[in-house]
Amino acid sequence: MNAEVFAAVAEALERGESAALVTIVSTTGSTPQRVGAKMLVFADGRLVGTIGGGCYENDAFWKAREAITSRRPQLVRYELTDDFAQETGLICGGQMEVYIEPIEPSPELYVVGAGHVAFFLARLAHEVGFRVHVVDDREKFANAERFPTAVEVAVADISEWLVHAALPPHAYAVIVTRGHTNDLEALRALAPRELRYLGLIGSRAKVARIFDALTADGMSPDVLAHVHAPIGLDIGAVTPQEIAVSILAELIAVKHGKTPDAPSMKWAPSSHKSESKSRESEDKSRESEHKRRKSEGTSQKSEVNSPQ
């Protein structure tokens, strides 16, 4: 039975599908299965294998589906009391501990653009386990010689390729094209999708212009709220190599559910910008008034202490 489970795990990873592996790790008394029995649970409710059926399995099944969503393992102890049996209508007896482990495929990283930053990012990302896909409309840059470890290198119109590409929900996408227009169209294609991570390279001013253009075209600000822009962690990166490191650091943080304290683009719709500017103006006015009063106080003190 476990051979069937192991085969299903391998197939799920190969096709990029998440699941949760449930394993009996300890038992006491009468239990439906021995230590080591396994069950694979998919997000849509499919099952492969069994840990004995009945009271244990049903509860573990739902906890496994929760683990797929939360991406966190669980160690669950089942001790069937009379109350539990009465609630479920199932009587097993004994105690059992099961370990529920989320199974995730290697993360897919889509690098949109094949320039200098993309070159170093793809190489580093491969080393830490990402399956890298690269797309650019320049064959001089997007080729197997420059990206030998990528699972896919596409030479195509960027926006058209993205429209037809089937990016899985667990994918990471990084927009690092050579120009404003390509960045805009790439973000237009990717922002509405369900992705684990979406980042856009560029200065705060550039990001604001792109966001404003998309909202002016009718895209909801809520759709753009999850975009990491400017991309990467603020480590003072300057060179393409350093920028690639800062981007990869953010990808790894997201992968492991971390939220590093790093500055990010505080973008807001135009209506909110006017309020922000108003508050900024008020702050500057208060600061000027404080300086004026301090200056007057210093002047008065000087007059009092000056010789007559």
Image (tube, rainbow, N blue to C red):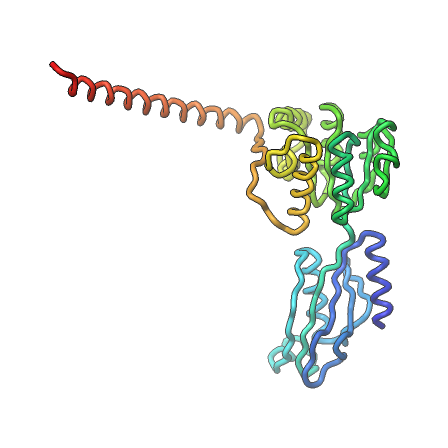
Residue 41 is situated, as x and y percent measured from the top left of the image, at 77, 63
* 265 left or right of 175 in image: left
Extreme residue in the bottom direction? 29
In which quadrant of the rendered view does residue 156 lie? top right
Extreme residue in the top direction? 308
Query: Can you see residue 86?
Result: no
Q: Which residue sits at x=53%, y=26%? A: 273
Extreme residue in the left direction? 308
Residue 270 is situated, as x and y percent measured from the top left of the image, at 57, 25
Relative depth, front residue between 231 and 220: 231
Residue 303 is situated, as x and y percent measured from the top left of the image, at 18, 17
Relative depth, front residue between 271 and 74: 74
Query: Can you see residue 47?
Result: yes
Residue 308 is situated, as x and y percent measured from the top left of the image, at 11, 14
Extreme residue in the front direction? 307
Q: Which residue sits at x=73%, y=43%? A: 172
Q: Is residue 62 above or below residue 83?
A: above
Q: Which residue sits at x=66%, y=26%? A: 210
In which quadrant of the rendered view does residue 177 lie? top right
